[in-house]
Image: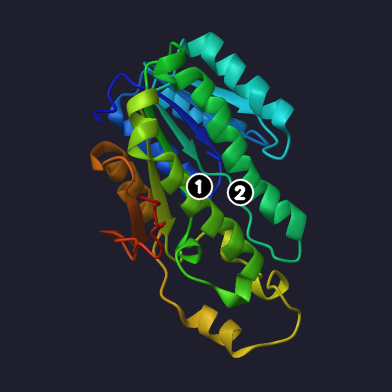
Amino acid sequence: MDLAGKNVVYLGGFGGIGQKCVQELLQRQLKALAIFDLDANEKLLAEWKGQHPDTDIFYQKLDITQKSDITAAYKATAERFGHFDVVVNGSGLMNDRLVELTIQINLLGVINSTLTALEYMDKAKGGKGGLIVNISSVAGLQPTAIMAIYSAAKTGVTTFTRAMANPFFYAHSGVGFITICPGFTNTGLLEDIGKKTTFTYDTPMLDMFHRVKRQSAEDCARNLVSAIETSKNGAVLMLELGETTEVDMPVMWKPQMDN
């Protein structure tokens, strides 16, 4: 997808990876960009507007755990932009001590945002189609025991997004889906990890966690935006140490049909 002249919605655009993604997206001469986040970064917002006067940059306060906020945010954006071509669900929390909130933000929030966005994007409902990008994690590709709740939520994101990318749905709505699975990335999510693990006692996994190589948020963002521009519907992409790899998801079960 050529992003020039497109309308983009980014959830979590003031966060670690999100902030760098927004900066990368704005280099593509977007027509409009809506940033949904819990709190505004007024300094950064003013900076982006000053640097990109030809792009309509819009902030909408959003608590991703509240469906009413999600509904209101998309309604306001549709009224302002007319339509949106790309939605990136990038809000995230990594803290297994907050079980319900981890599930609400990382999984339910993505589901509710996706289904709400489809109400406006679905060609069968008068929309123009487009692309929805859901940010999962390498913890959404394989069990990550040190953060079992986070891993479960992100695995849900991966599976949900792959299901939404079903070719039948795509033919109906004209909305494609890709799943982004970043590896360890230098952001605030990884700070004070010993206070966020599933269990309070020390494990060998915590030592391993501190030794894992990390990529920069800038490298992750650059590859994420490139994926928006080039990837096909249904792609599951691992963004690890500055490299992008398409993950070949195995078929584990096939239903047996009656004759």
Could you say which quadrant of the image residue 95 lies in? bottom right
Q: x%, y% of residue 18?
A: 49, 44
The mark found on residue 238 in the picture is none
- Residue type, mark 1 in image: Phe
The residue shown at (66%, 65%) is 149
The residue shown at (72%, 72%) is 195
In this view, the residue in front, 157 or 222, is 157
In this view, the residue in front, 216 or 146, is 146
Circle 2 — which element?
A: helix
Farthest residue, direction front: 259
Residue labelled with disc 1? 160
Q: x%, y% of residue 212?
A: 45, 78
Real-space Cα separation, disc 2 to disc 1, in angstroms: 9 Å
Please say whether residue 43 is visible from this viewpoint. no
Circle 1 — which element?
A: helix
Q: Nearer the viewer, mark 2 or mark 1?
A: 1
Please say whether residue 147 is visible from this viewpoint. yes
- Residue type, mark 2 in image: Leu
10 Å crowding of disc 2: few (<14), some (14-19), many (20+): many
Could you say which quadrant of the image residue 4 lies in? top left
Could you say which quadrant of the image residue 123 lies in? top left
Q: x%, y% of residue 203?
A: 64, 88
Query: From the viewer's perspective, is residue 147 above or below residue 75?
Result: below
- Whichever of labels 2 and 1 marks the residue nearer the N terminus, that label is 2
Residue labelled with disc 2? 107
Answer left or right for 110 relative to 4.
right
Q: Are marks 2 and 1 in contact (CB under 8 Å)?
A: yes
